[in-house]
Image (cartoon, rainbow, N blue to C red):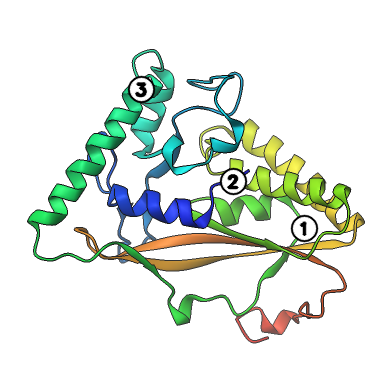
Amino acid sequence: MEISAKTRKILWARSGNFCAICKRELIINATPTDDDSIIAEECHIISSKTNGPRYDPAFPQEQIDEYSNLVILCRIHHKMIDDQKETYTADALRKIKIDHERWYKEKLSQSKAPSSPKLKRLKDNIPSFLQRLSTGREVQNIVCGACASSTDYDELETQEEVELVGRFFSWVQDLDVLNLDSDLALSVQTGFELTGMITELEEAGFFVFGAREIQLLDGGVGEPANFPVAIFRVLRKTNPEIRSVSIDSIDGKV
């Protein structure tokens, strides 16, 4: 399971690009010398992991990544609610989410006819090709700092292929919530295991491709902001869309 593109768009739109607790804007625009900074995290109210915060064995697993079980927070308050799970219970977080979305809706109604936040693709930012990935480190570099992911794969023919591709995408999705920047050991271990999965996919007849695309989050009450999206595709080696790219074409010429 993973958060669908539709769910993610609804979640971000209704949060208004603000933390549900501190109301801080969650996408900080680039400076003349640095890229945009993403301080938002899509947080689960009920964890899917048995040792996770607010885990409830009675909660339906198919609803873990649904809109009703998610809330947008800054990184500081995500850590706070997970560290202080006895204070920030599931019911408390649901109320925080409802109150925040009501606050944002009222804020919109008081402004001068703002438009709803929308994601826009920028022609110059659409990757001309996806890079073939062979290591977990390459996957981590694409995911790190991304606000969303876009995944796709060729038609699968066996249950083994379903499990193999599904496991890879599940790990990619988990990279969104793992604090790899501050835990070097976890980053190394995760990269190693992802490399193993890519090798398994290749042995099964697949290649993994990926890239980063900067889209634009526009509308609402904040200024337009960059919205990085991590793109991953798992394609059969026989897929006719796959083509070789020479070293001289890395600058963007295919």
* Three-letter code for the amino acid on which mark 2 is drawn: Glu
Nearer the observer: mark 2 or 3; the answer is 3
* Three-letter code for the amino acid on which mark 1 is drawn: Ser
Q: Is residue 5 left or right of residue 84?
A: right
Quadrant position of residue 62: top right
Residue at numbered disc 2: 2
Gap between marks 3 and 1 measured at Cα: 43 Å
Gap between marks 2 and 1 measured at Cα: 23 Å
Q: Are marks 2 and 3 in contact (CB under 8 Å)?
A: no
Secondary structure of the residue carrying numbered label 1: loop
Query: Along the polypeptide, which appears first: circle 2 or circle 3?
Result: 2
Nearer the observer: mark 3 or 1; the answer is 3
Query: Along the polypeptide, which appears first: circle 3 or circle 1?
Result: 3
Residue at left offset 69%, top offset 69%: 131
In the image, residue 84 sits, relative to residue 171, either above or below, namely above
Q: Compare residues 112 and 142 and report the one nearer the observer.
A: 112
Q: Which mark is residue 134?
A: 1
Query: Looking at the image, which residue sits at the far bottom?
Result: 253
In the image, residue 164 sits, relative to residue 71, either above or below, namely below
- Residue 72 placement (x, y as % from top left): 37, 41
Whether residue 178 is visible, yes or no, is no
Query: Along the polypeptide, which appears first: circle 2 or circle 1?
Result: 2
Whether residue 72 is visible, yes or no, is yes
Quadrant position of residue 94: top left
Residue at numbered disc 3: 91
- Residue 241 placement (x, y as % from top left): 76, 79
Q: Which mark is residue 241?
A: none
Secondary structure of the residue carrying numbered label 3: helix
Q: Quadrant of the C terminus?
A: bottom right
Gap between marks 2 and 3 measured at Cα: 23 Å
